[in-house]
Amino acid sequence: MGQRTPLYDQHLALGAKMVDFGGWDMPLHYGSQVEEHHQVRRDCGVFDVSHMTVVDVSGAQAKVYLQHLLANDVERLQLLGKALYSGMLNEQGGVIDDLIVYLAADGYRVVVNASTRDKDIAWMEKQTAGFDVVLNERADLAMLAIQGPQARAKTAELVSTARATLIHGLKPFQGLPDGEWFIARTGYTGEDGLEIMLPAAEAPAFLAELVGAGIAPIGLGARDTLRLEAGMNLYGQDMNEDISPLAANMAWTIAWEPASRDFVGRAALQAQQDAGVADKLVGLVLEERGVLRAHQVVRVEGAGEGEITSGSFSPTLGKSIALARVPAATGERAEVEIRGKWYPVRVVQANFVRHGKALI
């Protein structure tokens, strides 16, 4: 038996098929993964993401600590509540985790992945040496993600006037508090939407209200196909401690300037950059019948071989898509081995669907 979120009993009552995810018992789907996927793209749905880890960072040196810890630079956060996506790297330039950090009134709020919680917190604690900083893990909070084109409008109808005003005023990638709630316009689906952190004791009633208003519960299965269509990495599949952000389509998250900011892993990344990065993360599209899956071999004529890191049938596009790490010299065509046969695939940017629209 894994760990359970405060909403476990509700998932069972809603008919969820439960599976282990990073040591947590989580809903895979509530009947039809494909229908749940379409629901988010066309309208909206609600995900329980209470397994995510929230850490508040405060203290006189919170900012310089995070500038040391993260490859992206929190100096970029000038607007209260503004969020930043970053890798947290080891000394070799590998990705310990990817995370979101928000600028708060009294410091910063960091949200890291569930499956990496223990090593993340141990690493963050280790890096506090020499900094006047306090880390506070917020195990008292639950987290719900309401995602889809109607997410903000429908959620705003169910909350207080003050919270509705906050929701309507949020800029993309911004999160602000209201009492003990923290409401952010962020997500992991490629759609507009909200991620709401709230006291665990209040989460069951809020989920019941959302579902009662016709906002469908969505499982991890659809969460995975939605994020894959959006070209968003999944930690442990598309990158890990042995993979550089430069080979994981995360180069845009590295703040090289100012050159004086010596973040963890900088020297290793600089050396990789100077030597030339051997691999890149791309998107693949299979035009024929068949399903692309993680670990299938990708063959690129004249360049060598690579591997699919995430693959699935895309409900929005009606064909199979994947993220794959391939030689840097890869052009527009490649082949994938499926059950002993080679199939041609199109190589595209790792971004297939955004805001309900096909990009390929």
Image: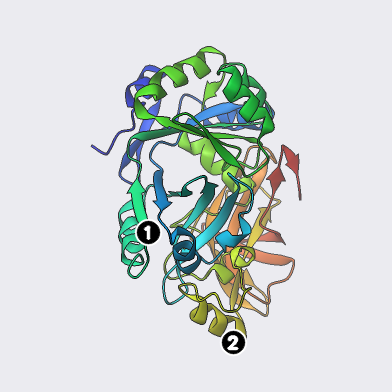
Colour mapping used in the image: rainbow
In the rendering, which numbered label is found on residue 267? none
Q: Is residue 228 above or below residue 219?
A: below
| Label 2 packing within 10 angstroms: few (<14), some (14-19), many (20+) | few
- Looking at this view, is 77 or 211 the one in front? 77
Residue that protrudes farthest toward the bottom in the picture: 275
- Residue 26, how many percent across, how many down? 37, 35
Q: Quadrant of residue 253?
A: bottom right
Res. 155 visible in picture? no
Q: In this view, does 205 lie above or below 38?
A: above
- Residue 85, how many percent across, how many down? 56, 55
| Label 1 packing within 10 angstroms: few (<14), some (14-19), many (20+) | some
SS assignment at label 1: loop
Specify whether 339 is left or right of 134. right
Q: Decide: marks 1, 2 in contact (CB < 8 A)?
A: no
Q: In this view, does 40 lie above or below 112?
A: above
Specify whether 175 is left or right of 61. right
Specify whether 326 is left or right of 68. right
Q: Is residue 56 above or below residue 9?
A: below
Q: Which residue is drawn at 56% across and 81% down?
A: 270
SS assignment at label 2: helix
Name the residue beneath numbered marker 2: 275
Q: Which residue is drawn at 71% across and 51% down?
A: 287
* Residue type of the residue flagged with mark 2: Ala
Q: Nearer the viewer, mark 1 or mark 2?
A: 1
- Residue 284, how many percent across, how many down? 65, 57
- Looking at this view, is 76 or 319 the one in front? 76
Name the quarter where the N terminus is drawn.
top left
Q: Which residue is drawn at 61% across and 38% down?
A: 185
Name the residue beneath numbered marker 1: 133
Q: Mark 2 or mark 1, which is nearer the start of the sequence?
A: 1
